[in-house]
Image: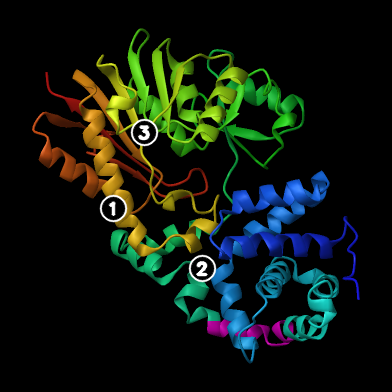
């Protein structure tokens, strides 16, 4: 028997494609890579692409809850990964749109009919209808289960609770929300007030966060943004936009962006001043994204593909006045943008990242001129990668001097309605 063919504009099609992407994540792939495979293989329409993406992202944000519900409703573990992920996607949709429960169950059953020659149709129908019938009982159970309630792995919950004893619930809760869409206005063309007026002229509501940061009331495709193709604005979280301001660059400086892809901070630095800037990136594919971003914005930098800690591979011996060390990290501060991170990361990864960060920071310090400044940056909320890393570095380097940020020795941002989680520490090399 041939598997049922799904209408490409149906919810069943979107549920199945999302389930395939979530299955790939469960096997260790990133969600971005899994969705890229989906776009290439199935070429969904723009509207279906949005639906698949919403289902995949939403399901992974709510994975702790969905996994709890399935374990309560199943008599034995499922051996078909795609079926399990289909049920997770359908459960997420039921939570998100309870008014459409009849349609969601029907379409999930239709999607399930494409698996194993249709033998799972009855199971899909039974599980989802039981989830609806037992909603109150399941919600009561979720309220008492930490992973289901907070929708993070237990080790992550414990780490956040230890780091933020007064705010851990808010930090975890914010990581389960939809992130804002924030723009960085290219100051070489406009400012926040001027660009907000241009947005209003095309019916897009927004508000200013500072003189160049603009947060949209609702996410928009970039093609709808005035002057986007001409480089008048870029999509960049407000927390990430702090980097260029904190590094304190001035025209004529030699500047290094040590871990530069995809190039947002590189571009922001170049929009701020006329610099001799070198951008490093280890991965060739990601390095090309830097070039693409700079080309759209009409900016120039020397882009090199190299391990920033391997100085022999790229450094010619001339020191830099400023260095941005936006080091690889757990990305725990941007998990709402990449919800697969919560389930792909392991507790041991944090120590591994910390070791790599130490290696990078020690190497880059050698390339900084006396009196120069280095901005250490992560998109992490875990102290081991942030404050502890910088404290250990200062302890190893007697010529490293902390520079206060807003009256504090460091700046730790946590996710909230206006920005993602970022960490910054500014260090100066003694003359």
Q: Is 374 left or right of 40, judged from the image as shown? A: left
The circle drawn on residue 151 is: 2
Q: Is residue 137 visible?
A: no
Q: Which circle's residue, 2 or 3, is located before the other in the chain?
A: 2
The residue carrying mark 3 is: 307
List x then y, in percent, for residue 176.
54, 59
Magenta stretch: dominant secondary structure: helix
* Magenta segment: 130-141
Question: Which residue is found at the position 48% from the left and 33% from the top?
Answer: 261
List x then y, in percent, for residue 253.
33, 12
Distance, label 1 to label 2, CA atoms, is: 21 Å
Callout 2 secondary element: loop
Q: Which circle's residue, 3 or 1, is located before the other in the chain?
A: 3
Q: Is residue 188 above or below residue 90?
A: above
Callout 3 secondary element: loop
Q: Is 107 left or right of 254, judged from the image as shown? A: right
Furthest residue in direction left, as rendered? 398
Magenta stretch contains residue 140: yes
The residue carrying mark 1 is: 383
For marks 3 and 1, give the one nearer the viewer: 3
Magenta stretch contains residue 11: no
Q: Is residue 127 visible?
A: yes
Task: Classify the position of the N terminus by image quarter.
Answer: bottom right
Distance, label 3 to label 1, CA atoms, is: 25 Å
């Amino acid at each position: 028997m041939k598997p049922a063919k799904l209408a490409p504009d149906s919810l069943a099609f979107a549920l199945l494609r999302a389930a395939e992407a979530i299955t790939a994540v469960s096997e260790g792939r990133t969600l971005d890579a899994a969705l890229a495979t989906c776009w290439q293989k199935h070429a969904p329409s723009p509207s279906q692409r949005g639906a698949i993406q919403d289902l995949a992202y939403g399901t992974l944000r709510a994975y702790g809850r969905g996994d709890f519900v399935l374990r309560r409703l199943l008599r034995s573990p499922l051996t078909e990964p795609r079926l399990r992920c289909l049920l997770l996607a359908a459960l997420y949709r039921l939570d998100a749109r309870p008014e459409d429960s009849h349609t969601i169950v029907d379409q999930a059953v239709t999607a399930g009919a494409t698996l194993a020659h249709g033998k799972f149709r009855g199971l899909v129908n039974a599980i989802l209808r039981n989830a609806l019938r037992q909603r109150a009982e399941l919600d009561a159970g979720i309220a008492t289960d930490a992973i289901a309630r907070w929708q993070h792995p237990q080790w992550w919950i414990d780490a956040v609770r230890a780091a933020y004893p007064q705010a851990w619930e808010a930090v975890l809760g914010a990581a389960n929300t939809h992130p804002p869409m924030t723009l960085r206005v290219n100051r070489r063309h406009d400012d926040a007030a001027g660009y907000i007026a241009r947005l209003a002229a095309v019916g897009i509501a927004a508000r200013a966060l500072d003189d160049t940061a603009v947060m949209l009331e609702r996410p928009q495709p970039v093609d709808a943004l005035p002057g986007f193709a001409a480089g008048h604005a870029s999509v960049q979280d407000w927390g990430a936009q702090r980097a260029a301001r904190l590094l304190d660059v001035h025209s004529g400086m030699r500047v290094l962006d040590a871990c530069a892809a995809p190039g947002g901070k590189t571009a922001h630095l170049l929009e701020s001043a006329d610099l001799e800037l070198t951008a490093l990136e280890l991965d060739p594919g990601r390095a090309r994204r830097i070039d693409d971003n700079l080309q759209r914005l009409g900016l120039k930098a020397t882009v090199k593909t190299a391990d920033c800690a391997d100085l022999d591979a790229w450094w010619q011996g001339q020191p830099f006045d400023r260095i941005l060390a936006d080091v690889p990290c757990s990305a725990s501060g941007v998990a709402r943008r990449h919800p697969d991170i919560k389930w792909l990361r392991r507790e041991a990864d944090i120590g591994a990242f910390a070791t790599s960060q130490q290696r990078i920071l020690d190497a880059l310090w050698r390339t900084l001129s006396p009196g120069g400044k280095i901005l250490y940056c992560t998109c992490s909320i875990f102290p081991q990668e942030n404050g502890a890393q910088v404290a250990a570095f200062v302890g190893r380097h007697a010529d490293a001097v902390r520079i206060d940020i807003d009256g504090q020795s460091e700046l730790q941002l946590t996710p909230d309605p206006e920005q993602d989680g970022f960490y910054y520490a500014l260090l100066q090399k003694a003359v």
